[in-house]
Image (cartoon, rainbow, N blue to C red):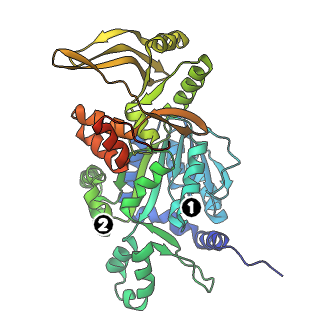
Amino acid sequence: MTEPLSSADTMRLAVQRLYDADPANEWARMDRHRTEFAVTLRALHEYLPRPPSRVLDCGGGPGRYAIELARQGYQVVLFDLSTGNLALAREKAAGAGVALSFVQGTALDLSRFAGDTFDAVLLMGPLYHLLEESERQQALAEAHRVLKPGGPLFAAFIARYAAHRDCAASYPDLMPTQRDDYDRILADGKAPPPDDGHVAFVAYFAHPTEVAPACWAAGFEVATMLGVEGVVSAAEDEINKLEGPAWDAWLNVNWQVASDPSIHGGVEHLLVVAHKPAWREVLKRIVRRLDEAGVLHTIVGGTSLALHGLPLRVKDLDIETDVAGAYRFAALFADHTSLPVALRESAVYRSHFGQFDFDGVQVEVMACMERREGDAWVATQVSNTQVVAVDGMPVNVSWLEEEALAYIRRGRLDRAALCLPRCDRERLLALLRGTQPTLEL
């Protein structure tokens, strides 16, 4: 007796049938939606490393983006679920005179590729067709694993109201006959496979407010989110007829507004550009060495906030230690010194301070930090810490509550506002009173 298919297998087969049925239609889609294609290409040009960087086009369909990147000199692996898409991609690549690698598989399993393999990953298709949040996180996690530290991810989502906008623009009479399907999309974003097994568009329609957080949750730092149809969403028929300066003018307008959150609910596709943080590997390397040397240390500042799970792009690593530890750090990492550790003083702060460069990741080390208040110097060194795991490695970080108060004192109310919703009330009140909370860490 044949075992019934799981919901994931049912969805996978439905997606394969959809794209195997008409790969040429998917190829031509970028001609019908020139703005989406052009704005996405501009994002790739803006954020991709220079060729001949190695790019994984995961879920790249019949290869419109893969072939264009190969023309520019990138080494592209086109990875797709649909054998029909891959067959057409081979034909189109040969016609264009470019070389691609072709691999068939699912975005949920990139195990054939080693970790830190690709300079960039395009995930511009698979997230359309993963109904469950756990599956979308799995696909993002796989992309994160195979991407080199510092490399960009381009992750595309179908926007929540795309189906309704398409229906209104092209076949409005369909709504009353399929009201339940459209109501479900409004409710949970899901358009599952039909029960009869017929070929149909199956998809997850993501709400704009969940898109960037999904990428942050997968360990990426989000650079921008774009509504790639811009202001011509569902109204591009006349725009598509333009050429020359008129087309360029509209492309520039749509690129200019693509990052404006006010349009993200009224487009068909959302594109997140994010990066796999390079600083995490540097942090693990430093912490490992400091632990081996017995140097006490605490991760503070923006790095601490990021390690607490806040959506914050880390500009540099901030490390507090004692005075002996600061100079021991300088000895351990002498080859990375950009500013030697020394007692330094500004109008507001003084500390034993030094700066270091680890392959472009900036690190600042400080000890005995003090802040000027009137004519006196007041100690501001972190006094409350906890341990978080960074890829399984224990790392000592400052309390989020202590960071929030430090940002308030410094007038950084934007950072404080980011912290406060995640702060523990009792810890915060205890710090304000100058007492210690009786909490288990």
Label 2 CA crowd tier, 10 Å (few <14, some 14–19, many 20+): many
Residue at position x 40%, y 82% in the image = 183
* Nearer-N-terminus badge (1/2): 1
Q: On the image, which quarter does residue 119 sit in?
A: top right
**Disc 1 and disc 2: Cα gap in Å?**
26 Å
Location of residue 410 in the rendering, given as x and y in whole percent from the top left corner: 23, 31
* Residue on which disc 1 sits: 134
Residue 132 visible in the displayed image: yes
Locate residue 95 relative to residue 369 in the image: left or right.
right
Placement of 33 over or under 192, stated as above or below: above
Q: On the image, which quarter does residue 236 sit in?
A: bottom left
Tell me the SS state at disc 2. Answer: helix
Residue at position x 39%, y 76% in the image = 186
* Residue on which disc 2 sits: 266
Of all residues shown, which one is farthest toward the bottom?
177
Location of residue 152 in the rendering, given as x and y in whole percent from the top left corner: 48, 41
Amino acid residing under circle 1: Ser
Placement of 143 over or under 405, stated as above or below: below
Placement of 327 over or under 121, stated as above or below: above
Amino acid residing under circle 2: Gly
The N terminus lies in which quarter of the figure? bottom right
Residue at position x 56%, y 37% in the image = 148
Q: Nearer the viewer, residue 287 or 204?
A: 287
